[in-house]
Image (tube, rainbow, N blue to C red):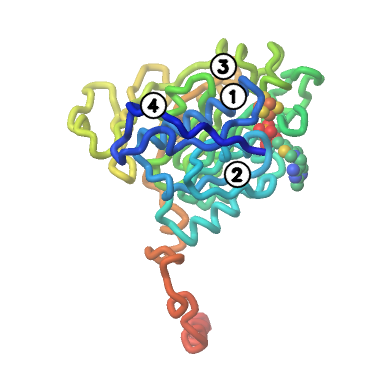
Amino acid sequence: MSYDRPTIRHPDAPKNDLGYTRKQYEGSISTLCAGCGHDSITNAIITACFEMNLEPHRIVKLSGIGCSSKTPAYFLGKSHGFNSVHGRMPSVATGANMANRELVYIGVSGDGDTASIGMGQFAHVVRRNLDMVYVVMNNGCYGLTKGQDSATADKGSKSKKGNPVSLESIDLCELAIQLGAGFVGRGFSGDKKQVVEMLKAAVAHKGLAFLDIISPCVSFNNVPTSTKSYSWVREHEEANLPFDFIPYRREILADYPQGSTLPVTLHDGSVLNLHKQEDKIDVTSRTAAMGALEKAKKDGHILTGILYLNPELPDTHAILQTSTTPLNTMGESELCPGNAVLRKMNESFR
Ligand SMILES: Cc1ncc(C[n+]2csc(CCOP(=O)(O)OP(=O)(O)O)c2C)c(N)n1
Ligand code: SF4
């Protein structure tokens, strides 16, 4: 069931460069539990797309199954959407992206959806470096089915009615780095500013941008004994180096802060200014990122921010050398050139 928002808006509501208000980026009213972290991430996605001046009809939002996967109903109501099967968002995203490479793809998943039933799909979509933003709303439990521990629940962590988790947890950021992702970040739904900036950078990145956002489940996993609760994350969050996202076309581009700043140009010309600090990680090094994540875990901290970045990796289209013309703009004669062409192709393999 979904509920539409009222259509009335303040006449002076701020507009972006396209002349749209934030409303053009909203969806229907959320039916999630009041206080659910997923709603904050929904809000951050709306803000990021509005502020980036993305045209809603050029965005595709996709998801699997879970409370997290319901959220695309609550953002970007004027965009293309596909709520798929549990753990299968990546294959639907791959098909859509192969047919039309010119759209912005935002996939939303849960820790259950990604780290258990969808693990195989996750691994391969990262490996293929599909050009998309992949967001996991990570609450350490299966919220929709009443709070069972998920594979990202930390060993020893205890949810509202559960026993301490006896298995080692899966760290999706470490896994994404290991699988070859070129953009990996971790956020906390309670830190909207950081999440919005990371989302903008993720959209500007060419290839798969993975964001693991800790998003407390207030109904089943928000107790002090859980490492995915608001109180735990607030006490244990350790931000990695601060950064500014500077969208392409903003004049400030010429004004890089000097000294300890590393400007990284993303594929659309936007710039990420990474402000280096001593004792923080070098995000351009996979080994440094893995080491920092392991160290933070050992120290009982949660490292947030951009953790690994390599804007140079070829995406799926570049790897497979697909046509630069989106398939959905080709006619039948190009898509199905006939028997003679097929025979010639087959000959070339003999
Ligand atoms: C094939 C299949 N198996 C199991 C389920 C039941 N199921 C629905 S949602 C879910 C887990 C959701 O957890 P998560 O992805 O972490 O999302 P959350 O609800 O916590 O946001 C499960 C097991 C299903 N819908 N389909
Ligand atoms: S059950 Fe948990 S994850 Fe689902 S909407 Fe409620 S608070 Fe959010």
Closer to the chain start, of discs 3 and 1, is: 1
Q: What is the three-letter code of the residue carrying label 2?
A: Ser
How would you rate the neighbour count of disc 1 (Cα within 10 Å): few for under 14, some for 14-19, many for 20 or more? many
Secondary element type, mark 2: strand
Q: Measure the alpha-carbon separation of dots 2 and 4.
A: 32 Å
Q: Which mark is residue 301?
A: 3
Of badges 3 and 1, nearer the viewer stands 1
Q: Nearer the viewer, residue 60 or 213?
A: 60
Closer to the chain start, of discs 4 and 3, is: 4
Judging by the rendered image, the residue that carries numbered circle 4 is 10
Q: Nearer the viewer, residue 191 or 51?
A: 51
Whether residue 174 can be seen here: no
Closer to the chain start, of discs 1 and 4, is: 4
Whether residue 214 can be seen here: yes
Image quadrant, ligand 2 = top right
Q: What is the three-letter code of the residue carrying label 4?
A: His
Residue at image x 37%, y 46%?
312
Q: Measure the alpha-carbon separation of dots 1 and 4.
A: 27 Å
How would you rate the neighbour count of disc 4 (Cα within 10 Å): few for under 14, some for 14-19, many for 20 or more? few
Judging by the rendered image, the residue that carries numbered circle 2 is 63
Judging by the rendered image, the residue that carries numbered circle 1 is 37
* Residue 215 image offset from top left, x and y in percent: 59, 25
Disc 1 C-beta below 8 A from ligand 2: yes
